[in-house]
Amino acid sequence: MGMFCYQCQETGRGTGCEYGGVCGKSEELADLQDLLIYTMKGIAEIVVKGGLDASMLKDVNREVLKSLFMTITNANFDDDAIIGQITKMIEARDDLRNEIGEAELHDAATYEISSMRDMIFKASYADMTGREDKDVRSLKHLILFGIKGLAAYTYHALQLGKENQELYQFIYEALNATLDDEQTVESLTALVMKTGQFGVTAMALLDAGNTERYGNPEITEVKIGAGKNPAILVSGHDLTDLEELLEQTKDSGVDVYTHGEMLPAHYYPGFKKYNNFIGNYGNAWWQQEEEFKTFRGPILFTTNCIVPPVSEEVKERIFTTGATGYPGCTHITAAPDGKKDFSELIALAKNLGPPVEIEHGSIIGGFAHAQVFALADKVVDAVKSGAIRKFVVMAGCDGRMKSREYYTEFAEKLPNDTVILTAGCAKYRYNKLDLGTIGGIPRVLDAGQCNDSYSLALIALKLKEIFELSDINELPIVYNIAWYEQKAVIVLLALLYLGVKNIRLGPTLPAFLSPNILNFLVENFGICGIHSAEEDLLNVCS
Ligand code: SF4
Ligand code: SF3
């Protein structure tokens, strides 16, 4: 039947995966994920055409967020989990349809469970081929992929008890628009900007959820070595899962380490009370197979990014929860009261050896907005005296492509009077380099996870206010952002909405941008790709 997916930066040949994904997604899984998205669009159409108020759709909202999150790159590889979710969502959709009475609806809102298999072709491959103007299709996909990222952050906020009904209403509005043949390049361009606006709302909501529950991140030295106790490794972005695991392991003799995007958890005061929360093990997501081998203990995936394990031994130690899944790995589901039972991981850890130390020492982070605001006087003085000439925002994702060595080289070659502001797993390309300090301020300021790019925007807005500038682009800040998956798409749209111009985006530009849409972004926002580090450094030094 074939598949087509071009939602991430590592897409096949830079144009699209058609015979299995570079990420490891099979054709069957790609098609099932497309059908799940198609079903979400059907639900959105019912909500919009039926004039339903999202605040009345509590359970549906939660499951829509989860469904979108399950289709993000490297989040869920389990066909059965996707089929289960489609089935659940068709039932939810049909209940909603019964509420609204007569309306002319798209197939996505009406197809039957019994015809699920027949719908796959309509929902996926056919949708991509020639049916729509390519600029319209490009904008619809830009919106859809942004919405996936937005849904992931909204889902995290919801885990922390934070909700904003306008976000749900907007998700329905946007998904419905992607089904609507009447949409034009103009109307969709406006919707792209609105998606960015709600991206800011979602990240602000999540920031409030994280900081109200765990305190404001503060400067923290995080150990990168290994101790002597058996241990569990936690990956992904969900802090509530980490909290629950720390509660259940605190007196068990089992230690907990972070991997990849979970590193910034160490910066929150709320996690510092756990003596068994030791440090960070390893690097960004794509190096996990080798690092999981030497870690030796169980691994808990709370969100993306899973790399299909090659080693059976590693696979037997992988557990998933929330929106993630991998066939053959145990999935920890929440009880009706929301609690998760991690006793199986704890018992397994006790039977396995402690991690093998693969590096030694520590790294420093915790420069989210409140911490940087606390240092504002120092930072402003350094800018005024010329000690800091420029800030370079290097937030985003890491990935396995060799071309990403560019980011290490770029960081290494930056002049000594520049400071890197980072967030997301992109940091692993340079956070262990010795880049020194400027007047006691480290030259790499890590704000946190990819969603904490919001902090970087707040810092920029604060500096704009302090320096009494009328435009955020007058600040001595340049942007060199690395992307991989759809959370980075919503971060990018959020920055565009905030008026940030001249963002350099790499290591390659999204395949889903048609030439005209790319041109539009170049002309209106100054977006550009990367060249060699030397060439791009000229722009920083100018
Ligand atoms: Fe290909 Fe990326 Fe889609 Fe995976 S998520 S199938 S690598 S485009
Ligand atoms: Fe990384 Fe997957 Fe995007 Fe959250 S963990 S930034 S790639």
Image (tube, grey):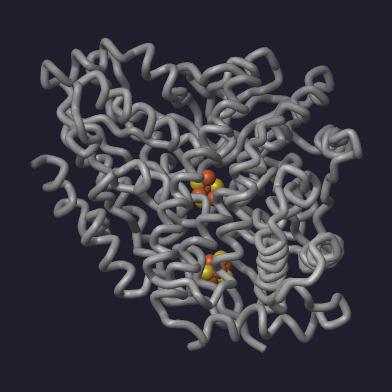
In the rendered view, tell whether residue 530 sits above or below residue 464: below
Residue in view at x 40 percent, y 58 percent:
190
Q: Position of residue 324 (x, y in %)?
A: 72, 52
Side of 118 relative to 270 (left or right): right
Find the residue positioned furthest to the left: 542
Quadrant position of residue 412: top left
The answer to whether residue 489 of the structure is visible from this angle is yes
Residue in view at x 74 percent, y 40 percent:
297
Side of 435 relative to 35 (left or right): left
Along the viewing direction, whichever of 380 and 21 lies nearer the viewer: 380
Residue in view at x 45 percent, y 58 percent:
191
Q: Position of residue 438 (x, y in %)?
A: 23, 19
Find the residue positioned furthest to the right: 336
Along the viewing direction, whichever of 217 and 38 lies nearer the viewer: 38
Find the residue positioned furthest to the front: 102
- Quarter occupied by the N terminus: bottom right
In the rendered view, tell whether residue 168 sits above or below residue 1: above
